[in-house]
Each structure stands twice: as structure tokens, then as C-alpha cells.
Image (cartoon, helix red, strand yellow):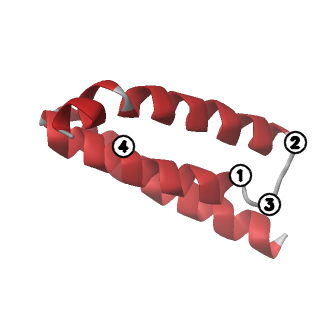
Amino acid sequence: MIWAIQELLPIAMSAITLWMTFLAGNKHPNAWAVGLVNQILWLVWIISVQKWGLLPMNIGMWVLYYRNHMKWRLA
């Protein structure tokens, strides 16, 4: 299980990031929600491989994606 998280999860996170960016480029209202879900996967990966230096990035992305999601919902 740990092997799958460490080796396969980055592939999934990359694919989701590309998908989310595609959605955002098309102004899809759920683009930022997809990004928020992806941050959960990032957090799991950061904890499993103990790459604590990426934790500030993860927290920052949570804030930005939430902000963007709220702005797009209200627009």
C-alpha cells in the first residue's frame, strides 16, 4: 500500500492537476473544487513520504483553490 502511495499517487496527482487546469481554462465552475480534492491527495503523499518542505505549498494551495472556488461560485 505504501509503495502505491509513494510511486503511483504522483502520477494521479499530475493527471488531476492537468485536468483541473484544463477545466479552469474553460472557466468550468468546478475546476477549483477538483483542485481542492487533489490537495487531499497531495497531503496524503506529503505525509507518506515525509516531504515536510512541501507542506507550506499544500496549505497555500488549499487557501488559493478555496478562494478561487468561492469567487467563481459567486460570479
Q: Along the polypeptide, which appears first: circle 1 or circle 2?
A: 2
Say above or below: 42 vs 14.
Answer: below
Q: Secondary structure at mark 1?
A: helix
Circle 3/circle 1 CB separation < 8 Å = yes
Q: Give amino acid for label 3.
A: Pro
Q: Secondary structure at mark 4?
A: helix
The image shows residue 37 at horizontal and vertical percentages of: 51, 56
Question: Which mark identifies residue 29?
Answer: 3
The residue that appears at 46% across and 58% down in the rendered structure is 63
User: In this view of the protein, can residue 64 be seen by the observer?
Assistant: no
Q: Which residue is mark 2?
A: 26
The image shows residue 44 at horizontal and vertical percentages of: 28, 48
Circle 3/circle 2 CB separation < 8 Å = no
The image shows residue 2 at horizontal and vertical percentages of: 18, 37
Q: Is residue 22 left or right of residue 17?
A: right
The residue that appears at 77% across and 71% down in the rendered structure is 73
Q: Along the polypeptide, which appears first: circle 3 or circle 4?
A: 3
Q: Pick out the residue farthest to the bottom.
A: 74
Q: Secondary structure at mark 2?
A: loop
The residue that appears at 81% across and 38% down in the rendered structure is 25
Local crowd size for mark 3, using a 10 Å CA cut-off: few (<14), some (14–19), many (≥20): some
Q: Give amino acid for label 1.
A: Ala
